[in-house]
Amino acid sequence: MKKTLVILAHPNLKDSIINKAWKNRLVKESNITIHDLYEKYPDGHIDVAYEQQLLLNHEKIVFQFPFYWYSSPSRLKEWQDVVLTYGWAYGSEGTKLHGKEFMLAISTGGPEEAYQAGGYNAYSMSELTKPFQAMANLTGMKFLPTFTIHGVRVLTEEEVQESAEKFVRHLQ
């Protein structure tokens, strides 16, 4: 089984329902490393060398986050800006991530029908996550299907736990 790195970016995980449930379920898997950016870097100062080594040590990279303003929380964007450097992650000599698998695990407060043409948000999740797909392309990673759960505010406890099990299956 591939070693998987889940980079979790949730600025308020203690009050989260779905992302906390996913994390609690994923820690039970021996081939999955959970890396919580807000826990590791409460001051926001990211250790680039450490992060790059984590990436090198895993075959599959997952960004897990709640959808904020049609993107990721700011710490994950900062992580991308400082870790995925020219000459390391992209550029003529930036091949360190080539061949790795990459996927997103996203939670939304809005219902699924809001994320489609003609829906409340006017665009599909695929359209809204194009920058992540472009990042995977630029860095030579294979973009895998996104795991998404919509309407987290109205899920029952059973549905939350069910989504955690589905997430594990999706990763494998």
Image (tube, rainbow, N blue to C red):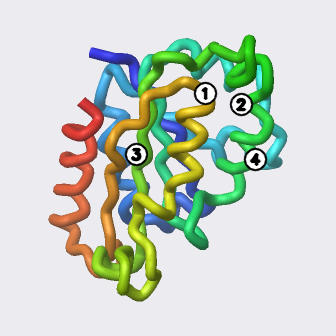
Q: Amino acid at mark 3?
A: Lys
Q: Nearer the viewer, mark 2 or mark 3?
A: 2
Tell me which residue sits at (58%, 14%) in the image: 56
Q: Is residue 88 above or below residue 65?
A: above
Q: In the rendered image, which residue does mark 4 sit on? A: 78
Q: Nearer the viewer, mark 1 or mark 3?
A: 1
Tell me which residue sits at (58%, 62%) in the image: 71
Q: Secondary structure at mark 4?
A: helix
For residue 101, which quarter of the picture?
Answer: top left
Please rate how many residues cluster around mark 3, counting C-alpha atoms within 10 Å: few if below 14, some from 14 to 19, many from 20. some
Alpha carbons under labels 1 and 3: distance apart: 26 Å
> Can residue 123 be seen?
yes
- Image side of residue 85 versus residue 56, left or right: right
Q: Is residue 154 above or below residue 42?
A: below
Q: Secondary structure at mark 2?
A: loop
- Image side of residue 100 versus residue 164, left or right: right
Q: Amino acid at mark 2?
A: Leu
Q: In the rendered image, which residue does mark 2 sit on? A: 84
